[in-house]
Amino acid sequence: MQKLAPLMVGALVAWLNMAHAQEPDYIIQSNAAPLNPLSVSPLAQPRPAPAPPPTSAPPAAPVSVPQVVPPAPVPTPAPVPQAASAPQPMPLASSKPKLKIGVLLPTGSATFGEAAQVVRDGMDAAAATDGQAELVYVDEQTRDLVARYRALVASGVRVVVGPLTRPGIAAIAKDVSVPTLALNAVDPALKASPRLLSLSLIVEGEARQVVRIMQEDGRGKPLVVSTADPLSRRLTQAFVDEWQKRTGVTPSVLDWPFDAAMTGALAQADAVFIAMTPHEASALKAALPATLSVYATSQLDTRKPDASLAGIRFIDMPWFLMPGQEQVKHYPRPSAALTMQTERLYALGIDAYRLAVLMANGKPAPGTLKLSGVTGDLMLGHDRQFERTLPLAVMMPDNNGQ
């Protein structure tokens, strides 16, 4: 997958369930933003939905063939009567059944129902496009989830996608009997079947990837700028932990807004990692030396980036940064306009379906089960969780005023 792509769209889903167990698993960064589809903003970049792929191969291009004059017909002898033979049976059409994939989503939940429906829309779009599997949906209800899971397996599904919530994952963890792809992070302390895998959009993975990018760029003295926001704290902690793990050194961390310590910290740094909202980052960027390299996660990816953020290096999923990639344009965009935050869940549904097909057709093995996905390059790790590697982009505000 390409590593560098131009910016045109984006936003960030804040996954705060680890920081606050009592809060919903999926929370929009602004916290007040709804999951309901919104009307298209005039600031949004146009992203027309591609036509669905043809159900059969397109006709081959015509080939020029020299004209040949046929020879004169040769008279054929009269047929010789023969004994009637028994009628031959007609060949049967291929009746190979489709792969059955079970799906556990809390579509009936007042808290998670809208998020679950968007994930389902993404899975449905992928299934309709590829035509390889039949999806069997079961509402994720924590009270009798184990019984629902067992009944789903008994119905003949070869793989299960879900649950979506952390309590749901914990409920079935020991009872997983077929390859099962949870759509949230799995607690490392949870005693779970080895057949339970995890695909999630947790922000900690993005912060860890930024560390790797900084080191590849030759940066050795990063400064981390954080705020009191829980998401910012999670990003900061993940970055610090990964930097310590790789170098044995603790990077400098400053809280925004800066105090008198800013001048000295900036003089020591050769790069800055910002764990902030776009509005906060805009004010910070104005206070930084123009020669200092600045890095961020998808938190800064917006439909209309502010000119003050130009030059910031950040990562985000191919679904937004690389719409022309084959694995991205193969799948239709949502039929309704969604917030950028919500659309991430739609992309998650697409990759969940694609991974489920792979899991059903082979034994999922760490390091070998890979997918060039719309949410990133995915590889199953030894912790049974898929690691996402995202393309790198440079913030380039739109000059057309759209």
Image: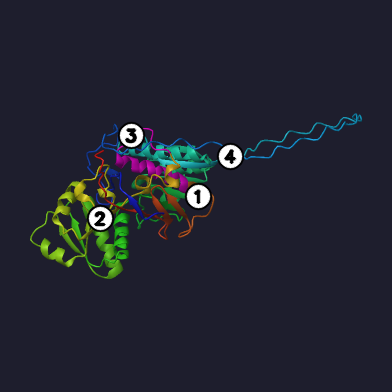
- Disc on the earlier residue, 4 or 2: 4
Read off the residue under disc 4.
61
Mark 2: secondary structure: helix
Amino acid on which disc 2 is placed? Leu
Residue 358's mark? Answer: 1
Q: Are the residues at dot 1 and dot 2 in contact (C-beta closer than 8 Å)? A: no
Q: Main secondary structure of the magenta part?
A: helix
The quadrant where residue 234 appears:
bottom left
The answer to which of marks 3 and 2 sits earlier in the sequence is: 2
Report x, y in % for residue 4. 35, 54
Question: Quick one: label 3 or label 1, which is nearer the N terminus?
Answer: 3
Q: What secondary structure is marked by label 1?
A: helix
The residue tagged 2 is 235
Earlier in the chain: of badge 3 and badge 4, it is 4
Which is more foreground, mark 1 or mark 4? Answer: 4
Label 1: few (<14), some or many (≥20) within 10 Å? Answer: some
User: Where's the C terminus, which quadrant?
Assistant: top left
